[in-house]
Image: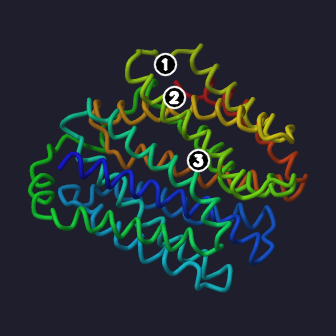
Amino acid sequence: MEKIVYLVSFLLAGTNYVVNFSIPLYLISKFSATPFILGIVGFFGNFAYTAFTYIFYKIKWKIHYPWFIISSLLISFAYFALPFLNSYSLIFIFLFFNGIFYSRFWPSLQYFFSSESQKIDRYNLAWSSGVIFGVFVSGYLFKIKNTLPFFIGSFSAFLGFTLSFINFEKFNQIYKNLPEKFTNKKTLNKEIKKVFFLNFVNFFAIGGILYLFPKLALTIGYTPPLISNIVTSLFIVRFFMFYIFSKIKIKLDEKTLFFSYFSIFISLIFTGISKTPIFHTFCLYILGTSSAFSFRMGILNVIEKGFSTELNESIIGIGLFVGPLILGSLSQIFGIYNGFIFSGVIILMFFILQKYLIK
């Protein structure tokens, strides 16, 4: 059953990114979408994901049930329908509901490891390799036909549903026996607050990259396959850094925090300054390293200290919807290049904020 969980996490992560990375390209090609619209698109799905993971965290809604099985089917339907929608409003609505579906998928899947936190590293390698595959193929699929990534993503999600559904009774029995150790009444200590805030900042940057970098890259003259190759580099590095961080121990202290924030700052600043593929790739290498560190620290702290996985995912979701919204707004006002530069400055403001407010 464990191998099925790894495979399903690979498939759905690939599904998510083959579609999400194609959405900006699709909206630009079909509707000539502005940076602000791209930011709003990134906002809707991720806002729903954040809101509902937090709601489910507060009410602890039936964690002893494999909700990820049903969610994968609903995700498949949503992605299949997207190319048939001819207005922004309908696309926003579908992405909002898809965010709700994912808010049940990832936390539910992570509960599988609630008794064996040491297997989280394998889980991280599984889903992060799916992200690499999804982003890499998205540009090539889009070049063949701009709707193909959505149909491939839908098929991949349906395959994940099929693999888990044929083992539904086994999964159902496993989930019924999960330990009741998660609670929302525990007090968050200083360390976990700092990890959560770093997770928010990393995914703030990643969300902005996913939805706004294609616009910047097309402005320079990059092709869709080249864009997907560049963004894939972020996730390749994150995959390898997940493995490296699983083998070495790095403490979360003021030095590692500063290095992480500074890495994100550099990544965004020079993404806005650069106009060459090699330098853009290097910028995303830096972000991939930082995001691997913060995500691993976050999920391990949550599981080992008995917090709900929805709590960690809701923090990530906030970053994913705030990032595109702010970067999209700044790019609309000051231009796409300056939007990235100003977002990098905001990262330093976040560092100062957490340093003096988190006690």
Label 2 vs 3, first from the N-terminus? 2
Percent from the top left, x then y, of residue 277? 78, 41
Please rate how many residues cluster around mark 3, counting C-alpha atoms within 10 Å: few if below 14, some from 14 to 19, many from 20: many
To which residue does mark 2 refer?
194
**Residue contact between numbered discs 1 and 2, judged by CB atoms under 8 Å:** yes
| Cα–Cα gap, marks 1 and 3 | 20 Å
Q: Secondary structure at mark 2?
A: helix
Label 1 vs 3, first from the N-terminus? 1
Q: Nearer the viewer, mark 2 or mark 3?
A: 3
Amino acid tagged 3: Gly
Question: On screen, 30 above or below 226?
Answer: below
Display colour scheme: rainbow
Question: On screen, 21 above or below 306?
Answer: below
Q: Secondary structure at mark 3?
A: helix
Percent from the top left, x then y, of residue 289? 57, 29
To which residue does mark 1 refer?
252
Q: Secondary structure at mark 1?
A: loop
Q: Nearer the viewer, mark 1 or mark 2?
A: 1
Amino acid tagged 2: Lys
Question: On screen, 131 above or below 94?
Answer: above
For residue 118, side relative to residue 301 (left or right): left
For residue 22, side relative to residue 216 (left or right): left
For residue 162, side relative to residue 49 (left or right): left
Q: Which mark is residue 82?
A: none
To which residue does mark 3 refer?
319
